[in-house]
Image (cartoon, rainbow, N blue to C red):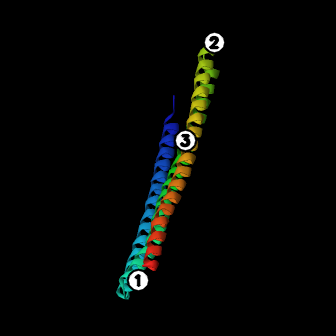
Amino acid sequence: MMTAEQLLAAQKTNLETLFGLTQKAFEGVEKLVELNVQVAKTTLNEAADHARAVLAVKDAQELLALQASLLQPSAEKAAAYSRHLYDIATATNAEVGRVAEAQFAEAQRKFMTAVDSAAKNAPAGSENAVALMKSAMSAANNAMESVQKAAKQAADVAEANFQAMANNAVKAAVKPVAAAAKRATTA
Protein backbone atom coordinates (compact mmCIF):
# COMPACT_ATOMS: atom_id res chain seq x y z
CA MET A 1 0.00 0.00 0.00
CA MET A 2 1.28 3.47 -0.84
CA THR A 3 2.07 5.93 1.91
CA ALA A 4 0.73 9.48 1.83
CA GLU A 5 4.21 10.72 0.85
CA GLN A 6 4.43 8.27 -2.06
CA LEU A 7 0.95 9.22 -3.22
CA LEU A 8 1.79 12.92 -3.03
CA ALA A 9 5.05 12.35 -4.94
CA ALA A 10 3.19 10.38 -7.63
CA GLN A 11 0.59 13.14 -7.98
CA LYS A 12 3.35 15.76 -8.21
CA THR A 13 5.09 13.75 -10.94
CA ASN A 14 1.84 13.33 -12.85
CA LEU A 15 1.11 17.05 -12.60
CA GLU A 16 4.60 17.93 -13.86
CA THR A 17 4.15 15.52 -16.75
CA LEU A 18 0.79 17.08 -17.61
CA PHE A 19 2.29 20.58 -17.64
CA GLY A 20 5.24 19.34 -19.71
CA LEU A 21 2.90 17.79 -22.28
CA THR A 22 0.78 20.94 -22.35
CA GLN A 23 3.92 22.99 -22.97
CA LYS A 24 4.91 20.70 -25.87
CA ALA A 25 1.43 20.98 -27.37
CA PHE A 26 1.58 24.79 -27.16
CA GLU A 27 5.01 24.78 -28.78
CA GLY A 28 3.53 22.80 -31.66
CA VAL A 29 0.63 25.26 -31.98
CA GLU A 30 3.09 28.17 -31.81
CA LYS A 31 5.12 26.69 -34.68
CA LEU A 32 1.93 26.19 -36.67
CA VAL A 33 0.88 29.81 -36.12
CA GLU A 34 4.35 31.05 -37.13
CA LEU A 35 4.20 28.95 -40.30
CA ASN A 36 0.74 30.24 -41.21
CA VAL A 37 1.71 33.88 -40.57
CA GLN A 38 4.77 33.45 -42.79
CA VAL A 39 2.68 31.81 -45.52
CA ALA A 40 0.09 34.60 -45.32
CA LYS A 41 2.78 37.30 -45.64
CA THR A 42 4.46 35.53 -48.54
CA THR A 43 1.15 34.92 -50.31
CA LEU A 44 0.17 38.57 -49.97
CA ASN A 45 3.50 39.75 -51.40
CA GLU A 46 3.27 37.25 -54.25
CA ALA A 47 -0.31 38.32 -55.03
CA ALA A 48 0.84 41.93 -55.27
CA ASP A 49 3.72 40.95 -57.54
CA HIS A 50 1.38 38.85 -59.69
CA ALA A 51 -1.11 41.71 -59.99
CA ARG A 52 1.69 44.04 -61.11
CA ALA A 53 2.88 41.48 -63.65
CA VAL A 54 -0.65 40.99 -65.03
CA LEU A 55 -1.09 44.75 -65.39
CA ALA A 56 2.18 44.93 -67.34
CA VAL A 57 1.09 42.24 -69.85
CA LYS A 58 0.79 43.47 -73.44
CA ASP A 59 -1.05 40.59 -75.14
CA ALA A 60 -2.89 37.30 -74.51
CA GLN A 61 0.14 35.16 -75.36
CA GLU A 62 2.22 36.92 -72.71
CA LEU A 63 -0.64 36.51 -70.21
CA LEU A 64 -0.81 32.74 -70.89
CA ALA A 65 2.94 32.42 -70.47
CA LEU A 66 2.79 34.38 -67.20
CA GLN A 67 -0.03 32.21 -65.85
CA ALA A 68 1.77 29.02 -66.85
CA SER A 69 4.97 30.17 -65.15
CA LEU A 70 3.12 30.70 -61.87
CA LEU A 71 1.52 27.25 -61.62
CA GLN A 72 4.65 25.20 -60.92
CA PRO A 73 5.93 27.35 -58.04
CA SER A 74 2.42 27.23 -56.54
CA ALA A 75 2.40 23.45 -56.56
CA GLU A 76 5.88 23.33 -55.05
CA LYS A 77 4.89 25.84 -52.35
CA ALA A 78 1.77 23.83 -51.51
CA ALA A 79 3.89 20.70 -51.18
CA ALA A 80 6.42 22.54 -49.01
CA TYR A 81 3.63 23.89 -46.79
CA SER A 82 2.19 20.39 -46.38
CA ARG A 83 5.67 19.13 -45.54
CA HIS A 84 6.10 21.79 -42.84
CA LEU A 85 2.71 20.90 -41.36
CA TYR A 86 3.65 17.24 -41.34
CA ASP A 87 7.02 17.98 -39.72
CA ILE A 88 5.42 20.05 -36.95
CA ALA A 89 2.82 17.36 -36.23
CA THR A 90 5.44 14.60 -36.31
CA ALA A 91 7.83 16.44 -33.99
CA THR A 92 5.07 17.24 -31.51
CA ASN A 93 3.79 13.67 -31.61
CA ALA A 94 7.32 12.28 -31.13
CA GLU A 95 7.86 14.48 -28.07
CA VAL A 96 4.56 13.35 -26.54
CA GLY A 97 5.50 9.74 -27.33
CA ARG A 98 8.85 10.10 -25.59
CA VAL A 99 7.17 11.46 -22.47
CA ALA A 100 4.58 8.67 -22.52
CA GLU A 101 7.29 6.02 -22.91
CA ALA A 102 9.27 7.51 -20.03
CA GLN A 103 6.16 7.55 -17.84
CA PHE A 104 5.38 3.96 -18.76
CA ALA A 105 8.93 2.87 -17.98
CA GLU A 106 8.81 4.63 -14.62
CA ALA A 107 5.45 3.05 -13.80
CA GLN A 108 6.85 -0.37 -14.73
CA ARG A 109 9.87 0.17 -12.51
CA LYS A 110 7.72 1.20 -9.55
CA PHE A 111 5.36 -1.72 -10.07
CA MET A 112 8.22 -4.22 -10.21
CA THR A 113 9.71 -2.67 -7.06
CA ALA A 114 6.35 -3.08 -5.34
CA VAL A 115 6.06 -6.69 -6.53
CA ASP A 116 9.59 -7.46 -5.32
CA SER A 117 8.82 -5.85 -1.97
CA ALA A 118 5.59 -7.80 -1.67
CA ALA A 119 7.41 -11.01 -2.60
CA LYS A 120 9.93 -10.51 0.20
CA ASN A 121 7.14 -10.02 2.74
CA ALA A 122 4.77 -12.61 1.28
CA PRO A 123 3.84 -15.62 3.34
CA ALA A 124 5.37 -18.96 2.54
CA GLY A 125 3.76 -20.75 -0.39
CA SER A 126 2.96 -17.60 -2.39
CA GLU A 127 5.97 -17.96 -4.66
CA ASN A 128 3.77 -19.17 -7.53
CA ALA A 129 1.55 -16.06 -7.30
CA VAL A 130 4.62 -13.79 -7.33
CA ALA A 131 6.12 -15.67 -10.28
CA LEU A 132 2.80 -15.38 -12.12
CA MET A 133 2.70 -11.62 -11.42
CA LYS A 134 6.26 -11.18 -12.73
CA SER A 135 5.49 -13.28 -15.79
CA ALA A 136 2.39 -11.20 -16.54
CA MET A 137 4.41 -8.00 -16.20
CA SER A 138 7.08 -9.37 -18.52
CA ALA A 139 4.42 -10.30 -21.09
CA ALA A 140 2.91 -6.81 -20.81
CA ASN A 141 6.36 -5.26 -21.35
CA ASN A 142 6.94 -7.42 -24.43
CA ALA A 143 3.52 -6.50 -25.81
CA MET A 144 4.21 -2.80 -25.24
CA GLU A 145 7.56 -3.06 -27.02
CA SER A 146 5.88 -4.82 -29.95
CA VAL A 147 3.24 -2.08 -30.16
CA GLN A 148 5.93 0.62 -30.05
CA LYS A 149 7.92 -1.11 -32.83
CA ALA A 150 4.79 -1.51 -34.95
CA ALA A 151 3.88 2.15 -34.42
CA LYS A 152 7.38 3.21 -35.43
CA GLN A 153 7.22 1.07 -38.57
CA ALA A 154 3.78 2.49 -39.43
CA ALA A 155 5.11 6.03 -38.95
CA ASP A 156 8.06 5.26 -41.23
CA VAL A 157 5.72 3.89 -43.91
CA ALA A 158 3.44 6.94 -43.57
CA GLU A 159 6.47 9.23 -43.89
CA ALA A 160 7.61 7.47 -47.06
CA ASN A 161 4.10 7.55 -48.52
CA PHE A 162 3.70 11.24 -47.69
CA GLN A 163 7.03 12.04 -49.33
CA ALA A 164 6.13 10.06 -52.46
CA MET A 165 2.70 11.69 -52.65
CA ALA A 166 4.17 15.19 -52.33
CA ASN A 167 6.76 14.46 -55.03
CA ASN A 168 4.10 13.03 -57.35
CA ALA A 169 1.84 16.04 -56.81
CA VAL A 170 4.63 18.45 -57.78
CA LYS A 171 5.54 16.33 -60.84
CA ALA A 172 1.87 16.19 -61.87
CA ALA A 173 1.65 19.98 -61.66
CA VAL A 174 4.82 20.46 -63.71
CA LYS A 175 3.59 18.56 -66.80
CA PRO A 176 0.56 20.77 -67.56
CA VAL A 177 2.62 23.89 -66.80
CA ALA A 178 5.29 22.86 -69.30
CA ALA A 179 2.64 22.04 -71.91
CA ALA A 180 0.85 25.36 -71.34
CA ALA A 181 4.11 27.30 -71.55
CA LYS A 182 5.00 25.51 -74.78
CA ARG A 183 1.57 26.28 -76.27
CA ALA A 184 1.86 29.93 -75.22
CA THR A 185 5.27 30.36 -76.87
CA THR A 186 4.27 28.59 -80.10
CA ALA A 187 0.92 30.36 -80.47
- Badge 2 crowding class, 10 Å Cα cut-off, few under 14, some 14 to 19, many 20 or more, is few
Question: Which amino acid type is shown beneath numbered disc 1?
Answer: Glu
Question: Which label's residue is closer to the chain start, 3 or 1?
Answer: 1
Which residue carries the number 1 mark? Answer: 62
Task: Estimate the x, y position of residue 165 in percent, counting from the top left.
Answer: 50, 54
- From the viewer's perspective, is the residue at label 2 or at label 1 nearer? 1
Question: Which amino acid type is shown beneath numbered disc 2?
Answer: Ala
- From the viewer's perspective, is the residue at label 2 or at label 3 nearer? 3
Mark 2 vs 3: CB contact within 8 A:
no
Task: Estimate the x, y position of residue 175 in percent, counting from the top left.
Answer: 49, 65
Task: Estimate the x, y position of residue 166 in percent, counting from the top left.
Answer: 50, 58
Question: Which label's residue is closer to the chain start, 2 or 3?
Answer: 2
Which residue carries the number 3 mark? Answer: 151
Which residue carries the number 2 mark? Answer: 124
Question: Which label's residue is closer to the chain start, 2 or 1?
Answer: 1
Disc 2, SS: loop
Q: Nearer the viewer, residue 91 or 60?
A: 60
- From the viewer's perspective, is the residue at label 3 or at label 1 nearer? 1
Please give the name of the residue rendered at 46% of the width and 74% of the height, measured from the top-left corner: 181
